Image: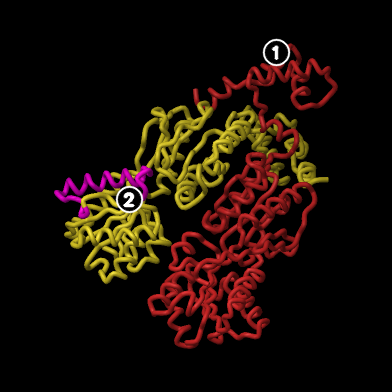
Chain colours: A red, B yellow
Amino acid sequence: MTAADHRAATRTTLTDVATLAGVTPGTASKALNGRGKLRPETRQRVLDAARRLDFRPNQLAQSLISGRTWTVGLITTDGIGRFATPVLLGAEDALGTGEISVLLCDTRGDAIREQHYLRTLAARRIDGIIVTGRRTDPRPPLAGSTDVPTVYAFAPSTDPDGINVVSDDRQGTQLAIGHLTGLGRRNIAHVTGPAHHAAATDRAAHTTHWLAAAGLPLATGRVQHGEWSEAWGRQAVRGVLATAPDTDAIFCGNDQIARGVTDALRESGRRVPDDIAVVGYDNWDTMALASRPPLTSVDMNLTEIGRLAALKLLEAIDGRPDPGTHRTPCRLVVRDST
Amino acid sequence: MTAADHRAATRTTLTDVATLAGVTPGTASKALNGRGKLRPETRQRVLDAARRLDFRPNQLAQSLISGRTWTVGLITTDGIGRFATPVLLGAEDALGTGEISVLLCDTRGDAIREQHYLRTLAARRIDGIIVTGRRTDPRPPLAGSTDVPTVYAFAPSTDPDGINVVSDDRQGTQLAIGHLTGLGRRNIAHVTGPAHHAAATDRAAHTTHWLAAAGLPLATGRVQHGEWSEAWGRQAVRGVLATAPDTDAIFCGNDQIARGVTDALRESGRRVPDDIAVVGYDNWDTMALASRPPLTSVDMNLTEIGRLAALKLLEAIDGRPDPGTHRTPCRLVVRDST
């Protein structure tokens, strides 16, 4: 006998409850679901019997009747890492602990796996899908998901009718530049990730915009693009100091770059923040706190993105979709690097 | 009309398939499930109709009949972070992409949330549970989960009849010490995490054991316990060099400590690995690769822990539980710090 057989054999059924209460299974069902016309004492007898027998209604059967499974699929396209995790936690909060369950699907960037998961989710009659990933570049919509409400979180979809919830990089960049200019810095360089990543090019364009709005050029005359790594941050410092020796602040596209920048500045004899202030992006505590000094950084409030995505999904499941791109604001966490 | 209503209204039913094939719903069901005696041409006609109508059998209904839901709960007790993620990926691989789905439950170390999730999982009639977390200290078994097959992965249970899959820290430590002594190092210090964490005390005991087996004492006469942080690694170096200036290797309890150790050694003028070799633990690429030089580190093969946990769970669901503590071997990843 397998464990499933054993549980099936020992599990209390609606018939057990009805027998103990001295009613038909139909009456017991009405009493437990609060439907139909029953005398209060009958309903109470059924509820007491259910409690005594520790009867737990079978959610599978309820879902067959209601057409809802109280289950959403969470598809992450490229790993369950630093970006997807807080999005997932925020979504879980908004869906209510255990009220709606999350089926996790990690496609690892593989289109075949994505198709496979979509078929599985359809067979399970999930109520909706949240799609996330670590790239902010718009992605094609899920193929064949048109009949299931879907929300794209952090990584938006190219579908003009899609529901997207993303970080407001424009406002996040404004916080960083406003902070640095507010501290009196005037020669601000920007060191960021690869030019083929939207997260890099978007923040670079916003940086140039907000500097121009403050009447300032980029200290080095151009954006320094490279890898999202500490090694690139260290390397970039040499170029920045050679091109613009009077640089008094470096705004970095992520915290790994900012940490590399900070290390290289210290090792070249520049004091952070006295000589050169440094601001990172992501507020990744492992990087920001271990840095010497700890990093001021833009926090994208990823948990809030997950929470809002879940709320937008619930609206869509409820027949009230709200298409478009919804942006959640960032906040600046100030530490000793500025 | 909600999205769920819409989908219910437009979804192909078994009756639609039967009507198109010109058979009764009972015959259509037999044909699709491969049961009963049917003429081959009848079966083919039903299969053709199902294909033309894009009929997808309702897994909820199938689960009600079979008693299996092909769903397992994955409970992480303290976040979906660096440790739980690879365990989860390994479990997902072993469960077969989409064959068995994973319901994710993050209890955030909260007993109330854990109880809530257990009730939800019971109502959903899941087939089994995998429990994981980031602490290797044995934890009490899940309360009230006795009727559902459960496997503890990475974080074992105190239940003597529990099924645990954990990392073999004894063998992992042997790899590190054997590597260092093989390189001719004789004065080896050990810098690790807090004395109230099993991951720290276990590795410390194994380190002392393997050094003794090689006829060596700890270079500093005792284990240096502190935080799992770079700051502690940097701080510990001062104590190690003051107590035992001839130290020629430092084995660290995790990669963050090892990175701090490496930074402090470099800044105090010691060459790594020429003067002092450094080995970390976890093989966390963010830390190990950004370190200067990149770190040699013990990799716990967390994905393999998840994979084995899933296999042990499938055995238990199948009525063949294999209680006890199963250990998966570590491997040493050699880089420039040794």
Identify the residue at horizontal 51%, vertical 36% (top origin). B129
Q: Is residue A256 above or below residue A149?
A: below
- Residue designated by label 1: A19
Q: Chain of mark 2?
A: B
Q: Are marks 2 and 1 in contact (CB under 8 Å)?
A: no
Q: Nearer the viewer, residue A262 or B132?
A: A262
Q: Can residue B215 be found in the magenta stretch? A: yes
Amino acid on which disc 1 is placed: Thr
Q: In the drawing, does residue B332 fall left or right of residue B7? A: left
Q: Mark 1: which secondary structure? A: helix
Which range is magenta?
A: B192-220
The answer to whether any part of residue B48 appears in the image is no
Residue neighbourhood size for the residue with mark 2, other residues' Cα within 10 Å, grouped as few (<14), some (14–19), many (≥20): some
Q: In the drawing, does residue B61 fall left or right of residue B174? A: right
Q: In the drawing, does residue A23 fall left or right of residue A54? A: right
Q: In the drawing, does residue A299 fall left or right of residue B4? A: left
- Residue designated by label 2: B225
Q: What is the CA distance from the residue labelled 2 to the residue labelled 1? A: 63 Å
| Residue A275, position as x, y percentages in the image | 48, 80
| Residue A160, position as x, y percentages in the image | 74, 64
Q: Is residue B45 above or below residue B273?
A: above
